[in-house]
Image (tube, coloured by chain):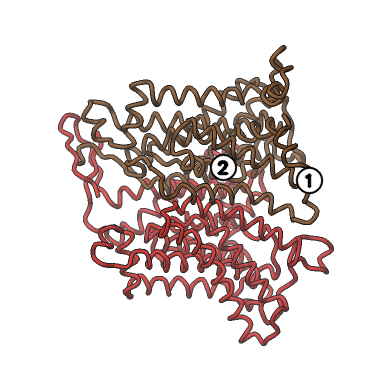
Amino acid sequence: MDFLEIFLSANFWAAALRIATPLVFGVIGALICERAGVLNLGIEGIFTAGAMAGWMAVWLGAGLWGGVLVAAGAGAFFGLIHAILTVPLGLSQHVSGIGVTLFATSLSYFTYRTALPDVSSPPRIEPFKPLDIPGLSDLPFIGPALFQQTALTFLALFVVAATAFVLYRTPLGLAIRAVGDNPSAVESQGLSVYGLRIGAVVVGSALMALGGAFLTMSAFDAFFFGMVNGRGWICIALTVFASWRPGKALLGALLFGAFDAFQVRLQTDVGSFIPGQVFLMMPYVLSIAALILVARKADYPRALLTPYFRGQR
Amino acid sequence: MIRFEPREPASLQRLILIPVAAAIVALVLAAIPITAAGVNTFTAYGLMAKGAFGSMFAFTEMLTRAAPLILTGLAAAIAFRAKLWNIGAEGQLYAGALAAVAVGTGWIDAPAVVLLPLVILAGAAAGGLVMLGPTLLKTRLGVDEVVTTLLLNFVILLFVQMMLEGPMQDPMGMGWPQSEPMLDAATLPKLMSRMRIHGGLIIAFAAAIAIHILLKRTVWGFEIRAVGENASAAAHAGLPVKATFIRVGLLSGAMAGLAGVGEVAGLKGYLTADLSPGFGYSGIVVAMLAGLSPLGVVIAALFIASIFVGADSMSRATSVSNYLADLIVAMSLICVLISGLFLRFRIKFVKPRTNISQETQ
């Protein structure tokens, strides 16, 4: 197959956008947490919890948007745990994040297993359908690329714009960015460092969970063990790659989605003499490469990983 | 208003009491999911205790499960001591197992006195080399090792699957993705007849003692502790910070690699891609429960192993899923993190307005 042919097909870009959507939620969520100074390694477990909780809510009859809300709530719950451990208690953000990932993952698996003790094939739900907007969907190229997507993809794009607006155009955004760079300056303005950080982690975690919910409610229609498969960690890498900016986060996720969609198509061509695992490795290798690429100039939020204690200089 | 006051260096009693309390709290909290699954908590815990300690077989199974947990626990403990966040023990374990299989399935034909040490060395070296990459990326380029080690776990597992479906597949395995069996001369001896308990446990104990001596009694150990307390101060004092990170990375990866050796050369006898049920990640919990002490790791690993073995046995008899074990392990980690505060700080409840808390480090 011709490479150019791949890049010029609307199907390819539709796939890229679909692969990018959960990552967009995850990267924006991680970015909000880290901008406030808190690394959230709970992301992998929060993805799993969002995927499980959202799916289960729909399966129990809550409706698709009800499922989205439940997923966000589950994310916020685990985010709150991480926030309490790392912000007022000032515990290691690395270890607490791993703890939240282990807790959220095992609780999701336990809940799923307890609710469905002996199913051999996972039950399915009716997932989100592609939005079909008369007129727009019929546009050449853009129509099929953009309007093969479900409502959650559009929600992700809206979240990017909203996050960029709040971070850079509102006093709240200024305070969130400041609390990740120089918390004592925020304190001296009479704002609550704890409040801002906890709020950012809870909101960021709710968004991460939507990334998980996309997997079970749009990309697939069922929940599988191990389905998150490192997507959360990839988001943490992409956040560094995007230098903590929402626009670049979207770009990074799309680039990643495009590469992934490309290698899947390449696989059908050369898959006969290159083992499939080589292609499956690519997302992780690519994330590591992205980290190495930006390592020298990465401009971490200055107070990232540093707990803040009131009255401390 | 809560206020934290730093404590004097913690007493040994407190060092032991804190993780024990955390484990108990985690077990009490686990009553909620057990009850939700419709089983009496005491029945469930009774069955778990029986499953881990109820017979000689149960007890040796528990010890067999503890061996890899001790080693991955040591991998995390020594790395975290230097604040090198190696979350990649899972991948390093598989690298060690793969190397052990590469050396021990017929490539080299030698008597056990030669072959077995070679297998062990190859596994340790492979684990160490896998960790060397992220460590060098950290010291040379400033790439965060947390994310690179986490991502490498997936890469290595896929690499193992690739080898097991390709060049290292057992031709007699009827198409299953598994390696050829280890030669008898490359197999760790069994410690008891008719039980699965094997020499990997001896390796694990020896490693714990060696790391303990390294940390307490040697210059390298002093450097590791100093770098972990404050890397920039250690650099100012002229300590070789980068070299210390590299040593710690190699050693930490080697511990995880040894865990892989034990599982293939002691327990399974051949390699499959489901060799480890997350030993690398549980090792982090083991290390934290142990307060990063190498000897404490042994005790903590025994606790975690009895949870896993007990829950497996209990879930066969009741409707409680054995994911309960993972849940208890995760809650233990969170509880021990919180209870660690009681170790480092005296926690006082003070009235608002008078709260000028001191720097707490």
User: Where is residue B52, by image quadrant?
Assistant: bottom right
> Which residue reaches farthest top?
A134
Position of residue A72 relative to residue A137, above or below, is: below
User: Where is residue B111, by image quadrant?
Assistant: bottom right
Horizontal side, residue B100 vs residue A183: left or right: right
List the residue tagged with mark 2.
Answer: A105
Q: Which mark is residue A268?
A: 1
Nearest-to-viewer mark from 1 and 2: 1
Residue B68 percent across, percent down from the top left: 56, 65
Position of residue A37 relative to residue B315, above or below, is: above
Rendered shade, chain A? brown
> Crowdedness of circle 1 by 10 Å Cα count: few (<14), some, many (20+)?
few
Report the quarter where the N terminus of chain B lies. top left
* Towards the viewer: B178 or A9: A9
Horizontal side, residue B98 vs residue B5: left or right: right
Q: Amino acid at mark 2?
A: Thr
Residue at horizontal 62 percent and vertical 30 percent from the top = A214
Residue at horizontal 56 percent and vertical 25 percent from the top = A157
The chain assigned the colour red in the figure is: B
Label 1, label 2: how far apart the Cα atoms are? 33 Å
Q: Amino acid at mark 1?
A: Thr
The answer, for residue B344, to whether it is visible in the render is: yes
For mark 2, name the chain: A
User: Where is residue A222, by image quadrant?
Assistant: top right
The answer, for residue B302, to whether it is visible in the render is: no
